[in-house]
Image (tube, rainbow, N blue to C red):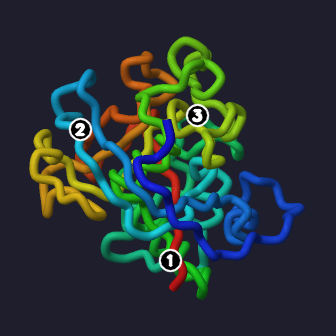
Amino acid sequence: MLLLSTPAGLATAQPAASSAPRHSLTYLLEGNAFAQIPAGEFLMGSRSGNADEAPPHRVRISKGFEMGKFEVTQAQWKAVMDSPHHESKGADNDRNIDPSHFKGATLPVESVSWDSVQTFLRLLNLRDEHYTYRLPTEAEWEYAARAGQTTDAPANLDQAAWCESNSEGKPQPVAQKAPNAWGLHDMLGNVMEWVQDWYAPDAYVTSPRNDPRGPATSSYKVYRGGAWLSDSKQCRVAFRGFDFPSGGYYSVGFRLVRTRK
């Protein structure tokens, strides 16, 4: 099924083709690593999943945005976190240039805390005068993951996701599986992805319809999408996970959203 409303298109120009490897920071900063996500409405949550996925509720994303086609790679993480802009004080003391348990430039970065991702974002934003980079909200993430579909998982999960059944017990290089209808790879599987929102088990009960941003505060941050070690029950667009913002795990990474400054 298609979206519940007709989405508004984005007027952003397409970047020129790049010769840089797609797992590199150059490719990301040139804009080639981003897909256009239109504004629109969708039904968020699930009736058949875990209790914290209910109730299903209509959500309106009022503005289009750009989302990373791929999870942030280890090559991109290292290039940013080793930046000369870095200041070794305050919240940046938790910086780790090479945190991942499974090593590889083309692999998604993992074992990163939500807090350390904020350091990455601060440093990345110093590099680009035209765009602001951030984590997606939970609603933006699920909207983009669904890409106009109302089912919780693709008809052929093996074609779309690295999960427990096919990952060989480890994350895989980004973008090896088929993208969704909006050009996003690995929204399900490979690594789970931090989002901006605080977690609450009943967040959907009082969630506003327009551009929800989650609870004002909590003890935990949300991650979404299932991972290389997840079974099919977790490799679903409505599945919600959570952890302390200071925690890092070898099945959790992230992807970016960018908006024009």
User: Does 102 sit left or right of 47 as displayed?
Assistant: right
Tag 1 residue:
132
Q: Specify the farthest residue to the top.
A: 165
Q: Quadrant of residue 85?
A: bottom right
Residue shown at 14%/63% (left/top)? 216
Q: Residue 45's x, y, as percent?
A: 28, 37
Q: Is residue 45 left or right of residue 103?
A: left
Other-residue count near label 1 (Cα within 10 Å), few / some / many at <14 / 14–19 / ≥20: some
Q: Determine the secondary structure under disc 1.
A: strand
Inspect the image, locate mark 3, and give the three-letter code of the amino acid beneath it.
Phe
Q: How many marks?
A: 3
Q: Nearer the viewer, residue 43 or 190?
A: 43
Q: Is residue 42 above or below residue 151?
A: below
The percent coordinates of residue 141 (x first, y second) are 42, 50
The residue that disc 3 covers is 102
Q: Quadrant of residue 50?
A: top left
Q: Earlier in the sequence, mark 3 or mark 2?
A: 2
Mark 2, residue position: 56
Q: Residue at x 60, y 85 (%)?
A: 130
- For label 2, the crowd category at 10 Å Cα-Cα, with few meaning under 14, some 14 to 19 and many 20 or more, is some
N-terminal of the two: label 1 or label 3? 3
Position above or below: 243 against 139: above
Residue found at x 33% / y 32%: 239
Question: Which residue ends up furthest to the right in the rendered image?
Answer: 19
Q: Is residue 58 left or right of residue 73?
A: left
Indicate the secondary structure of the residue bearing disc 2.
loop
- Badge 3: how crowded within 10 Å, few (<14), some, or many (20+)? some
Q: Secondary structure at mark 3?
A: loop
- Tag 1: amino acid: Thr
